[in-house]
Image: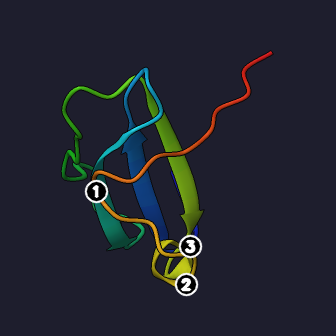
Amino acid sequence: NMLIPLDIIWIDKGGKITFIAKDVQPCKDEQCPLISGNRALYVLELNAGTGDKIGMEVGGEIRLRIQ
């Protein structure tokens, strides 16, 4: 149900990036393809291209502040 292309980043419980789907396009069909990252507890969605601009890569870490 997204309207713009996204970078989708999967993050495990320790804040490690486990999978990145870059430039995921909005789905125009009734049955959209499933994109899934393994070992992830969190998912971060960013405007497409943002992950590369800020240097995100699999194995990198993100500090999570969950309240």
Quarter of the image where the C terminus is located: top right
The amino acid type of the residue labelled 2 equals Lys
Q: Position of residue 19 (x, y in %)?
A: 26, 50
Residue 27: where, in percent of width, then height?
Answer: 35, 64
Q: Note whether 35 is above or below 49 in the view shown.
A: above
* Residue type, label 3: Ile
Give the label, 3 or 1, closer to the camera: 1
Mark 2 surroundings: few (<14), some (14-19) or many (≥20) residues within 10 A: few
Instruction: Name above or below for residue 29 compared with residue 31.
Output: below
Give the mark nearest the N terminus, 3 or 2. Answer: 3
Mark 1 belongs to which amino acid? Val
* Residue 61, position as x, y percentages in the image: 46, 46
Along the viewing direction, whichever of 30 and 43 lies nearer the viewer: 43
- CA–CA distance in space, label 3 to label 1: 23 Å
Do the residues under discs 1 and 2 have CB atoms within 8 angstroms?
Answer: no
What residue is disc 2 on? Answer: 53
